[in-house]
Amino acid sequence: MIIVQKYGGTSLADFERMENVARRIIAAKEAGNRVVVVLSAQGKHTDELVALAEAANPRGSKRERDLLLATGEQVSVTLMALVLQRLGHGAISLNARQAGIFSTSDFGAARIKKIETERILAELEMGNIVIITGFQGEARHGELTTLGRGGSDTTAVALAAALKAHACEIYTDVEGVYSADPRLVANAKKLPEISYDEMLELAALGAQVLQKRSVGLAKKYGVRLAVRSAMSDAAGTIVKEGNGVEGNFVSGVVNHDGIVRITISGVKDAPGVWYKVFDIMNDGDIAIDFVQQKKRSDGTKDISFTLDAERLDDAKAILAGNTHRLNFTGLAHDDHIAKLSVVSTGMATNPGVPSLMFEALFDAGINIDSISTSEIRVSVLIDKKEAARAAAIVHAKFFNGR
Amino acid sequence: MIIVQKYGGTSLADFERMENVARRIIAAKEAGNRVVVVLSAQGKHTDELVALAEAANPRGSKRERDLLLATGEQVSVTLMALVLQRLGHGAISLNARQAGIFSTSDFGAARIKKIETERILAELEMGNIVIITGFQGEARHGELTTLGRGGSDTTAVALAAALKAHACEIYTDVEGVYSADPRLVANAKKLPEISYDEMLELAALGAQVLQKRSVGLAKKYGVRLAVRSAMSDAAGTIVKEGNGVEGNFVSGVVNHDGIVRITISGVKDAPGVWYKVFDIMNDGDIAIDFVQQKKRSDGTKDISFTLDAERLDDAKAILAGNTHRLNFTGLAHDDHIAKLSVVSTGMATNPGVPSLMFEALFDAGINIDSISTSEIRVSVLIDKKEAARAAAIVHAKFFNGR
């Protein structure tokens, strides 16, 4: 049986941790599996490389940046292969080219097109543990790409699908997926299982545990994911097809305070304005939420929406570049807001979920600015100062006594 | 006209130095050339990667080590491309695969087999400065190799040959090739020209300025080398075909104190013993010199030879592993020796060179242990304590007053 394991950078930060990871890999091998391992760059190595690229040229080509960043994973996979060899096990590292991971040519945000598994299978056949660079692909003409931040999860899932692996284990620095951020909500619960759709919403809301794209890919190919800690033997969370676990009708409360609201004012009230805003933001790969408009007495509109705070500069630049197309007079932003969300596949059959959430907030005297929903999520905008308290209160409403 | 420039790690150690190098590259471009640049890894980066590999596994596979070390040049070329872009010039980095540099599969000591120049020429055609990783090759099955230490010089010469470049400029941290090591001999002279053969001998004797293999390749393909400082505009040394410069009948005095003498004792006096010693050392890629033997009254022989001190451990391990084949009883080494050499293509027509050298040493009361010669070189073994004084005296004999 083939199993794919993926380890994040924190668990590879020094040789002691690498050796711990190596022993976990060896245990999987000795249990009779053929083991394929996907690694991120060690510790803060990617951040260091990003800083180098910035220092060299803040507006340099993405191609060069990708080639530079990719050295991070190249270092971690070779070191891991060397450590495994020292511990007496056949091991070989493969980079994207060697592993046959072919991608589109979108530097910085490439997508995996296909994986030719011959070399990987041949190395497994020879008894080797195969250690593969995450986050990378080979595009046409021998070009090297990166899949974007967190792309190592995507590499692992794509490999598990291509190799028809029995399991895809994502080892990270937390013990699994929680009902809320354990740093904010003291009695957050580790979820034994979660559905792909719920995990997608949680990932989209900023839960760091799995990258959204990798969850989408896992859902598409039916790859069952096990999210576990690289540091402990605790049981993790299984991500799989399903309608949520019975009796577990709410799967997560997410407090996201890294958002801002942009308001564009003085927009001429003509058809197509909304379409243009969405179109412009989509071109910039900026996800927006809580879209609202307010008509003014002079016939113009104010349009507002929220986005990740770290994309604020990009969004402002894009909007400024489209002043003429959108025909607006003012551009402002507000960063005193936070988003609190409840995710539940059970919502379709438990319409009471939003009411319970609003009730909890009302009882605590926390004002709701606005509301946004999807089929399995309800989100509210609240004052950032209230965010932690609100998360605890809403979490208690759904999870206490269970 | 295409010119190939190669820059060593010292001149790339930080962004300030990289920017100096970038300005030199741009100057060559603006003078109307198409510029191909070969870079080593920055500063001590290769040493750091070697230390990492050692820490991971002192006996790890050479394949993994090569993949790890190659990240050093990958970092320097991408950063240089980014710096050049920031300074307003089209620039692209190419690694061995992308540049079409194909090598044998001898990890750690690969040889370049061929260079497919299409991509390089296409990038030059588009007006780009092309920055290529030194020291690396792509072998069969997408494997990556390194050419061994100093291999970036070899990459530059091979590229200059393949591209039929007008010039191959090797930028280093000295101003050219000197008549002796300037750190040891105060009035050492920079040589305006030197022949390939002389440079080969100097390189073999440990002059750090050019790697021996790259000189051999330059001779083979008639690539004229210019050795210059990356830090100054001083005229350097031209390495080209020739019989030495007229009136410059001695081209260099080299003091090499990083050598040791190994003595194998109690060897049975049978035919083939010397052959076996050479064969065994050759297999280990260890160059030996000053081979001597001494017969003992019991019919056995003592065999001694010199080698680079840094290969001592390797040599002892190899010999110990061949105790049975060589049939010896003792193995000792002596590190109180130094080698002093005079190199001159003029020696064939000036048989007086060795005599002048011996006379200078005799006048200074320095004892000669033994002598070794080639067609254009005469070397003596002396006491290490006398090495610096001997080099100055012999240098003065040939160069003072000229």
Image (tube, coloured by chain):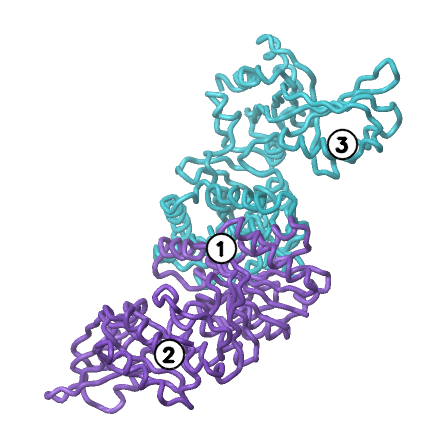
Chain colours: A cyan, B purple
Callout 2: SS: helix
- Residue A190: horizontal and vertical position, in percent? 48, 29
- Residue A19: horizontal and vertical position, in percent? 37, 48
Chain letter of mark 2 equals B
Q: Earlier in the sequence, mark 1 or mark 2?
A: 1
Q: Tell me how far mark 1 sits from mark 3, CA to CA.
A: 41 Å
Q: Is residue A259 above or below residue A37?
A: above
Residue drawn at x 51%, y 43% is A48
Identify residue for label 2: B398
Mark 3 residue type: Leu
Q: Tell me how far mark 1 sits from mark 2, CA to CA.
A: 38 Å
Q: Tell me how far mark 2 sits from mark 3, CA to CA.
A: 75 Å
Whether residue A84 can be seen here: no
Mark 1 residue type: Gln
Residue drawn at x 54%, y 15% is A389
How many dots with numbers? 3
Residue drawn at x 61%, y 23% is A342
Identify residue for label 1: B42
Identify residue for label 3: A319
Q: Is residue B361 above or below residue B108?
A: below
Residue B275 left/right relative to B44: left
- Residue A82: horizontal and vertical position, in percent? 40, 56
Chain letter of mark 3 equals A
Assess disc 2: are there few (<14), some (14-19) or many (≥20) residues with their C-alpha within 10 Å of its C-alpha. Answer: many
Residue drawn at x 63%, y 71% is B116
Whether residue B99 can be seen here: yes
Quadrant assignment, res B402? bottom left
Quadrant assignment, res A13? top left
In this view of the protein, which residue sits in the foreground, A230 or A73? A73
Callout 1: SS: loop
Callout 3: SS: helix
